[in-house]
Image (tube, rainbow, N blue to C red):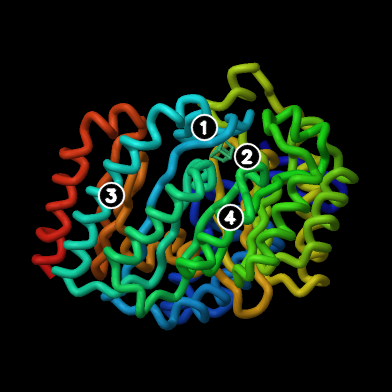
């Protein structure tokens, strides 16, 4: 698919596939290539539009600047809480509804506590410095305040947090956020929280299967600010079902007016295991073009509001074959996002679907946890056992 809309090229990434277009550009910059060479290479080999080449170069430069401080002994911890209040129509993540959560939260937490112990020992034995802890999912704030309190306490007991650069918790769904949970996060030193409205329009929230209102979004943001969590990220999606450019502009303006330190703009992706796909939602040319117009509005808008793009990735089956970009105000970038995207820092993954990434110069290996909660619970010993390989991997260096 490649066609023009006014001056805009749809499918501006040409024939370049893969989730990390910026990695290639960063590698070229590291190797000493100048911008002219990068333009020539990406135009000729992949037919990438000049707008996306310029974007990739700007983000690669930002990443290189931000990741200078990362050393080979730094590590990130990722922990997955795979429960959500309801499943979003576009989601294919491993997530479990609130009803089933009641049944599984307890054994799941018990299992990840054991996996935390395993990882804690490895981190100590191999003398890693934990720089980032990221609790994602799912929606970690579906846990009760007391469960969250215990989990954060467990993490602080298990890892030396002296050298920690950031501690992130993805709250995600505004209707799961309470003053009590935020105060628990603050108490345990969480530095970043995500509240992800995706859209500010209630008609779309209903359509995508969310059970919260626009008002809930404003309330959650105000609670997070009052709690004193230093950095707030908000996610939005360009190209949600039946949304127009005007809807998206309104969402972005509303979110920016809340002045979160980070805004992440995703482009709608039709994932295989999502409800949208099951309902045979097939985007047409108009959907692709509308998403393209949305991003064309977003980049200058973000710049005018002092947000800088600092990481970018692509997914399959995205409208217009477009990208997802994380923006930040100066000094508020999330290093985990860059380190993970550009594979610059090893990651110890804990919980269902978590991926452990091991890095050595010229070598990257992954250890996968299973993707299903029940299977994870049934095979939890095996998941921990798989991590023995980490010793072997680093013994060879
Ligand atoms: S909140 Fe996130 S993980 Fe949960 S269902 Fe929605 S998209 Fe999926």
Percent across and percent down for residue 333 are 57, 71
Q: How far apart are marks 1 and 3 (CA)?
A: 26 Å
Foreground mark, 2 or 3, reads 3
Asked whether residue 24 appears in the rendered view, the answer is no
Where's the C terminus, which quadrant? bottom left
Task: Compare marks 3 and 4 and give the one earlier in the sequence.
Answer: 3
Q: Which residue lies furthest to the right in this view?
A: 246
- Residue 318 numbered tag: 2
Name the secondary structure under disc 4: helix
Q: Residues within 10 Å of mark 1 (few under 14, many from 20)?
A: some
The mark nearer the N terminus, 4 or 1, is: 1
Rendering coords of residue 294 (x, y %):
80, 49
Residue that numbered label 1 is attached to: 92
Marks 4 and 2: CB-CB under 8 Å?
no
Mark 1 near ligand 1 (CB under 8 Å)? yes
Give the distance between the C-alpha atoms of the residues marked 2 and 3, in whole angstroms.
36 Å
């Amino acid at each position: 698919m490649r066609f023009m809309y006014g001056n805009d090229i749809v499918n501006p990434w040409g024939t370049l596939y893969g989730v990390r277009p910026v990695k290639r550009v960063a590698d070229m910059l590291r190797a000493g290539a100048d911008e002219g060479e990068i333009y020539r290479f990406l135009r000729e080999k992949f037919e990438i539009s000049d707008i996306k080449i310029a974007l990739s170069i700007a983000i690669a430069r930002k990443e290189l600047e931000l990741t200078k401080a990362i050393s080979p002994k730094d590590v990130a911890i990722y922990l997955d809480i795979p429960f959500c209040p309801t499943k979003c129509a576009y989601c294919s993540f491993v997530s479990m509804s609130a009803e089933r959560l009641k049944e599984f939260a307890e054994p799941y937490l018990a299992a990840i506590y054991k996996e935390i112990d395993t990882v804690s020992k490895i981190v100590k034995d191999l003398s890693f410095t934990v720089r980032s802890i990221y609790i994602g999912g799912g929606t970690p704030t579906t846990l009760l305040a007391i469960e969250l309190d215990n989990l954060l306490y467990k993490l602080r007991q298990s890892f030396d947090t002296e050298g920690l650069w950031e501690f992130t918790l993805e709250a995600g769904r505004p209707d799961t956020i309470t003053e009590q949970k935020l105060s628990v996060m603050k108490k345990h030193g969480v530095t970043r929280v995500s509240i992800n409205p995706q859209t500010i329009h209630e008609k779309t929230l209903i359509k995508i299967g969310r059970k919260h209102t626009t008002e809930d979004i404003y309330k959650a943001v105000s609670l997070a600010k009052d709690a004193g969590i230093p950095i707030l990220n908000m996610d939005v999606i360009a190209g949600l079902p039946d949304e127009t450019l005007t809807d998206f502009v309104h969402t972005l303006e509303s979110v920016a007016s809340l002045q979160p330190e980070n805004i992440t703009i995703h482009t709608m992706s039709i994932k295989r295991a999502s409800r949208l796909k099951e309902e045979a939602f097939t985007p047409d040319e108009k959907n692709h073009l509308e998403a393209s117009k949305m991003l064309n509005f977003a980049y200058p808008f973000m710049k005018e509001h002092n947000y800088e793009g600092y990481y970018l990735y692509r997914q399959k089956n995205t409208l217009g074959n477009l990208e997802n970009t994380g923006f930040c105000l100066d000094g508020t970038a999330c290093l985990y996002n860059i380190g993970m995207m550009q594979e610059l820092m090893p990651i110890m993954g804990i919980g269902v679907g978590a991926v452990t990434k091991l890095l050595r110069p010229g070598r990257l290996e992954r250890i996968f946890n299973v993707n299903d909660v029940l299977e994870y619970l049934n095979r939890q010993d095996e998941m921990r056992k798989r991590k023995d390989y980490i010793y072997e991997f680093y013994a060879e260096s």
